[in-house]
Amino acid sequence: MMQKTNNAKKTLYSIGGLLVIILISYLMSSDEVLGSYEKYEITASTAKRVGMGLTTFYLLAIGAIGAVLYAELSKVFSK
């Protein structure tokens, strides 16, 4: 029974962390629409959501690369 509780906590922490990253990305993104994009009917909210998606991807990619590097370098230096 305790194992299921621990797994549920880990899942909630992971989802919470992802939501925090998405929130940070949303706050960092700009809603500026360049003049060249107006002909495609891009709105400020669309630009903000696209910026949020790109920033979220960049943060998660950097985190994944950092985790791989940490795992590999810790193996090298622990020997």
Image: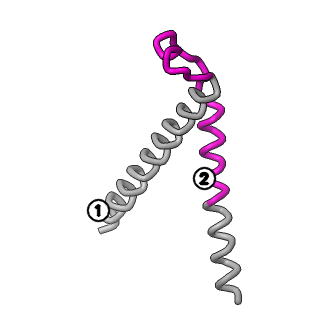
Q: Residue at x 67, y 56 (%)?
A: 16
**Dominant secondary structure, magenta:** helix
Can you tell which quarter of the image residue 10 is in? bottom right
* C-beta proximity under 8 Å, tags 1 and 2: no
Q: Mark 1 — residue? A: 76
Q: Residue at x 61, y 44 (%)?
A: 22
The crowding category of the residue bearing disc 1, from other C-alpha atoms within 10 Å (few below 14, some 14 to 19, many at least 20), is few
Q: Nearer the viewer, residue 56 or 33?
A: 33
Q: Residue at x 53, y 39 (%)?
A: 53
Can you tell which quarter of the image residue 75 is in? bottom left
Q: Nearer the viewer, mark 1 or mark 2?
A: 2
What x and y, as percent, mark residue 11? Answer: 63, 68
Asked whether residue 19 is drawn in magenta, I would say yes
Q: Mark 2 — residue? A: 18
Amino acid tagged 1: Val
- Say which mark, if any, is on residue 1: none
Distance, label 1 to label 2, CA atoms, is 30 Å
Asked whether residue 36 is drawn in magenta, I would say yes
Above or below 40: residue 77: below
Amino acid tagged 2: Leu
Q: Nearer the viewer, residue 22 or 39?
A: 39
Query: Where are the magenta residues, as a range?
Result: 15-43
Quadrant in the picture for the C terminus: bottom left
Above or below 68: residue 7: below
What x and y, as percent, mark residue 48? Answer: 60, 29
